[in-house]
């Protein structure tokens, strides 16, 4: 199973986004990595990488990453291997620790996700979903809802509007419009991203019809996998549940395109009902598939002392930020006197 985050088109996007991109490969291994970080120190990050066929070539990839990190004056390498054949029968945590890796203080890409295989027929894929999802997929048109896909970056503001409304209502951080616009402008022309839009079609007294967008979902495509990246819907039309047929449609479209998997990208760990992702985990699992766990985000120090200093600063930032906030508040009060 491939990942968009280790693809040529993602490398192009990262370059357009101003990152230094490192692409290297050898027999049985490859990686895409970007130089990240700032004042606290730089590091080389390989999202969902490196990609390797087995443990031996993984070691070669890791050696290459460390070498490139030194060239870029990075303190450490941040990796997120996902392929079970790398560690084989060994526990992934022990495998990574034995190679000098340390669990990162911040987990970046999701370590738990829901993968849907597209090997079956369309009917078999639908049968793997909740009956509610199947029924909505087959009957949503009766409610005046039509679903279309677009590869025109000019349509992205439809998604932005719903994302902003949802973020304001639920109080969560979201990707900025400029970032997603750049993703769309880079990936859509290469057939590596699509925006699915649900429209509510209504007719006035004169018989003239109009279309109102009520939900949108943005997906990324690698060689064999479609990723459910960003989605939001109109709160006003929430009773139509348009987000469900949006997902069923892009899943079946992925099969029609010849892809092998759909990655619903990010769920809560098993047996954690109070997890912050519990709500949309239930939603994602309703489409069937298999829950998959990856080892997570790991750091491999290149300069041990520098990495320890980085960790110390990273851990101190929340305390410093809180103290600065208190000082600013006191200054405002003093200035008002």
Image (tube, rainbow, N blue to C red):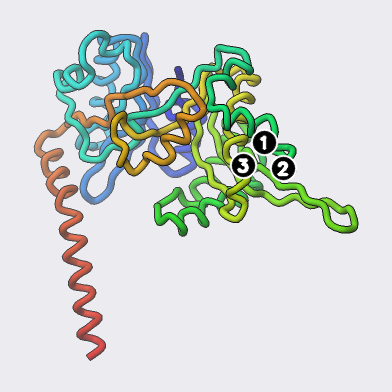
Q: Which of marks 1 and 3 is in front?
A: 3
Residue situated in front as seen by the camera: 35 or 156: 156
Residue, far front: 131
Residue situated in front as seen by the camera: 169 or 50: 169
Mark number displayed over residue 149:
1
Q: Element under label 2?
A: helix
Residue, far bottom: 337
Label 2 to label 1, Cα distance in Å? 19 Å
Instruction: Point out residue 173 in the picture as x, y percentages from the top left corner.
Output: 40, 52
Q: Residue at x 53, y 27 (%)?
A: 130
Q: In this view, does 64 lie to the left or right of 12?
A: left
Give the residue number, with chain letter if any, for mark 2: 143
Q: Which of marks 3 and 2 is nearer the N terminus?
A: 2
Mark 1 closeness class: few <14, some 14–19, many ≥20 residues within 10 Å: some
Q: Which residue is drawn at 35% across and 17% down?
A: 83
Q: Which of marks 3 and 2 is in front?
A: 2
Quadrant containing the N terminus is top left
In the rendered image of this protein, does residue 254 appear above or below residue 71?
above
Residue situated in front as seen by the camera: 249 or 311: 249
Q: In this view, does 323 lie to the left or right of 17?
A: left
Give the residue number, with chain letter if any, for mark 3: 242
Residue 222 seen: no
Instruction: Point out residue 264 in the picture as x, y percentages from the top left corner.
Output: 47, 30
Instruction: Point out residue 256 in the picture as x, y percentages from the top left corner.
Output: 65, 20
Tell me whether the residue at label 1 lies in contact with that at label 3, contact meaning CB atoms closer than 8 angstroms: no
Label 3 to label 2, Cα distance in Å? 10 Å
Residue, far left: 305
Residue situated in front as seen by the camera: 86 or 9: 86
């Amino acid at each position: 199973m491939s990942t968009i985050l280790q693809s040529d088109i993602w490398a192009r996007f990262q370059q357009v986004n101003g990152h230094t991109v490192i692409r290297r490969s050898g027999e049985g291994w490859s990686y895409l990595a970007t130089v990240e970080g700032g004042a606290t120190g730089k590091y080389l990050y390989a999202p969902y990488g490196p990609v390797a066929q087995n443990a031996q070539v993984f070691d070669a990839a890791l050696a290459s990453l460390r070498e490139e990190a030194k060239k870029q004056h990075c303190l450490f390498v941040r990796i997120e291997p996902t392929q079970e054949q790398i560690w084989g029968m060994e526990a992934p945590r022990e495998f990574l620790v034995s190679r000098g890796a340390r669990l990162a203080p911040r987990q970046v890409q999701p370590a738990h996700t829901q993968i849907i295989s597209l090997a079956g027929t369309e009917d078999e894929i639908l049968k793997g979903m909740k009956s509610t999802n199947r029924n909505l997929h087959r009957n949503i048109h009766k409610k005046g809802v039509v679903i279309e896909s677009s590869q025109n970056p000019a349509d992205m503001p439809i998604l932005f509007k719903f994302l902003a409304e949802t973020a304001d209502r639920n109080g969560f951080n979201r990707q900025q419009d400029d970032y997603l616009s750049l993703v769309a402008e880079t990936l859509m022309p290469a057939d590596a991203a699509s925006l699915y839009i649900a429209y509510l079609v209504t007719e006035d007294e004169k018989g003239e019809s109009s279309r109102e967008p009520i939900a949108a979902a943005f997906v990324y495509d690698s060689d064999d996998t479609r990723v459910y990246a960003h989605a939001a819907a109109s709160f006003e039309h929430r009773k139509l549940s348009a987000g469900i047929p949006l997902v069923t449609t892009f899943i079946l479209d992925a099969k029609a395109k010849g892809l092998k998997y759909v990655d619903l990208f990010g769920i809560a760990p098993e047996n954690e009902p109070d997890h912050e992702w519990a709500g949309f985990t239930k939603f994602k699992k309703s489409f069937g598939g298999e829950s998959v766990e990856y080892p997570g985000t790991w750091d491999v120090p290149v300069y041990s002392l520098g990495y320890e200093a980085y960790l110390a600063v990273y851990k101190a930032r929340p305390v410093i930020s809180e103290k600065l906030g208190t000082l600013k508040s006191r200054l405002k009060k003093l200035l008002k006197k």
